[in-house]
Image (cartoon, helix red, strand yellow):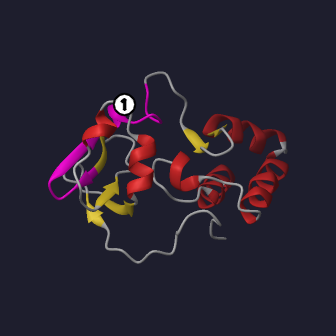
Amino acid sequence: MSCACCNTTTKKTRMSCPVCGQNCFPVSSQTILHQVQFPENQAIAEGDYAFCANSECNIGYFSPSNTIPKACLRAFQPDQEAMLCHCFDISESIYRMALDDGTAETMKAFIVQQTKAGLCACESRNPSGRCCLANFSQMEQEHTN
């Protein structure tokens, strides 16, 4: 399932994170502008950026000539829970509990319904700029193993 609000089928070239070496997806200027906090968002250099999803890496976005640390992003503040769905405020721990108590399918169905209706805002709300639906499936697989 692709997200109605963001272009998850873009074939832009991935880039390697300059710090951890992870293969990273490109992101739009819109995503960066909505995710980088003030005043850092006022001085973002032009260029093609990618998002480093490695939770151990301190780089949030990078281009061939610039890096933006995760500390400058809204979604990566101290004491903030790891999010699974930024659009509808579902943390990884909430979804794990739902998997444990058998209510996960209802939660996921809501997200799928809203996504199909174009009511998600992944490109702005998710720091990766990508749809989160694949993350639900990945967490479900990890839960069953």
Residue furthest to the bottom in view is 11
From the viewer's perspective, is 50 left or right of 43? Answer: right
Say above or below: 43 vs 62: above
Report which residue position mark 1 lands on: 38
Say above or below: 132 vs 93: below
> How many callouts does the rendering have?
1
Residue pictured at 71% horizontal, 62% vertical: 118
Residue 14 locus on image (x, y percent):
32, 68
From the viewer's perspective, is 44 left or right of 91? Answer: left
Residue pictured at 53% horizontal, 36% vertical: 82
Residue in front for this viewpoint, 59 or 39: 39
Quadrant housing residue 103: top right
Answer yes or no: is residue 58 visible.
no
The amino acid on which the numbered mark 1 sits, given as a three-letter code, is: Phe
Stretch of the chain drawn in magenta: 62-77
Residue 29 locus on image (x, y percent):
38, 56
Say above or below: 136 vs 15: above
> Helix or strand or loop: what does disc 1 sit on?
loop
| Quadrant location, the N terminus | bottom right
Residue 44 locus on image (x, y percent):
26, 45
Residue pictured at 24% horizontal, 60% vertical: 47
User: Is 64 in the magenta?
Assistant: yes
Residue in front for this viewpoint, 29 or 82: 29
